[in-house]
Amino acid sequence: MDRKKLLMIVNPKAGKMRVKSHIIDIINRFCSVGYGVTVETTQCAGDAVRIASGVTAEYDRVVCCGGDGTLNETISGMLKSGYNIPIGYIPCGTTNDMAVSLGLPKTVMKAADVVLEGSPMPHDIGQIDADRYFTYITAFGIFTHASYATSQALKNKFGHLAYVLDGAKELFGNMKKYHTRVIIDGECFEDDYIYGSVSNSISFAGLFKFPEERINLADGKFEVLLIKKPTNPKALTDLYFSLKKRRFNDKNILFKSASSVSFETDEKLTWTIDGECGSETNSINIENLKEKVSIIR
C-alpha cells in the first residue's frame, strides 16, 4: 500500500525561528502515522507561492510552518495550482492572528497534532483585483504599517510587543486621514478615514479584536471596518474604549458585513495583505471567494 504524502512548506525565519528546534520532531510525528514527508524551506518572499503552485494531486496534505504571511503565500500558491488539497497550519510567526481565528494551539507540536487529528474545514478567501489573495485581512491607514515595517530582528526579540510599541508611536504622532469612497455591497460611503480594513478574522496584530459572534470564516461575508479621525481628545477617548470593548457603535466607526467591497482614494495608499506590505494604489476591488480552500482545524 502506498504511503500518504505530505508536503511541508517551512519558513525558518518566522517569529523567533522557533520552528527550527522542532522540525525533526514534527517530521517524525507525521512519519509515525504513515506519511511520506517532503520538506521545502523558503529563502525569500514569494518562495511559498512558487512551491505551493507546483503542488499536484499526489499530496494528501500541504502543511505551512511559518507566520501568517507564509500561510498567505501557501494558500495563494495552492489557488494557482488548481488543487483543493487540505491545508494544515503550524503557526510559528510573531502574532499568528490566523491561528487565533482558527482556534489552533499555541504550541508547535500540538498544532502538528491538529494537522493529523483535525478536520478540513471550508474557508473563505479574499480576492484583490483578480490577481492577489488574502486569508484574513487587507487594510490601510494607522497601525497597519507596523506589521511589515517592523524589522524581523525586532519582532524576534520582542514578539507581539514590537507591534504595540510601533503602533503607540503612530497613535501619539499625526493620524493622517484619507478621503475615501467605499462601495460595500452596492452601498456607497464617502468620508475621511484614518483606517480601513476588510477582514475574515477575529483580530488583527493584537490591536483590533472583533465580536466573535459576528465572525464566520466560511459564510461568504467579510467584516468591513472604517474609522474616521476623532476631532477632539474626548472623541479619541470614546473611540479607544469602543474598540477596546468591541462596541462598534461609535460615531467615528463604520462596521458592516459584505461580500464585495471597493475603495477609491484621492491619493495612493499602501495596503497590507495578511500583515505584509501589499500594493500601492488609489483603487482596489475585493471579492469574497466563498469556501475556496480547506484548512485543517
Image (cartoon, rainbow, N blue to C red):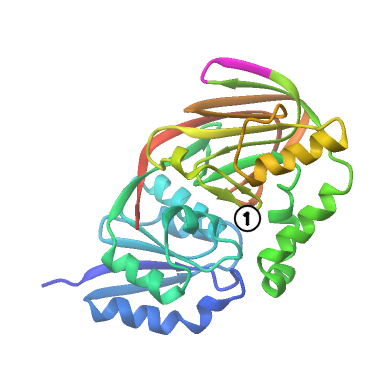
* Residue 115 spot, x, y in % from top left: 33, 65
Question: Looking at the image, which is closer to me, 250 or 266?
Answer: 250
Residue carrying label 1: 206
Tag 1: residue type?
Gly
Instruction: Say whether residue 160 is visible.
Output: yes
Residue 109 to residue 127: above or below: below
**Residue drawn where x is 80% and y is 54% of the image:** 168
Question: Looking at the image, which is closer to me, 152 or 104?
Answer: 104
Residue 123 to residue 254: above or below: below
- The magenta segment is 185-189
* Residue 197 spot, x, y in % from top left: 62, 37
* Residue 162 spot, x, y in % from top left: 73, 64
Neighbour class for label 1 at 10 Å: few (<14), some, many (≥20)? some
Residue 270 to residue 190: above or below: below
Question: Looking at the image, which is closer to me, 219 or 26?
Answer: 219
| The stretch drawn in magenta includes residue 87 | no
| The stretch drawn in magenta includes residue 187 | yes
* Residue 65 spot, x, y in % from top left: 47, 67
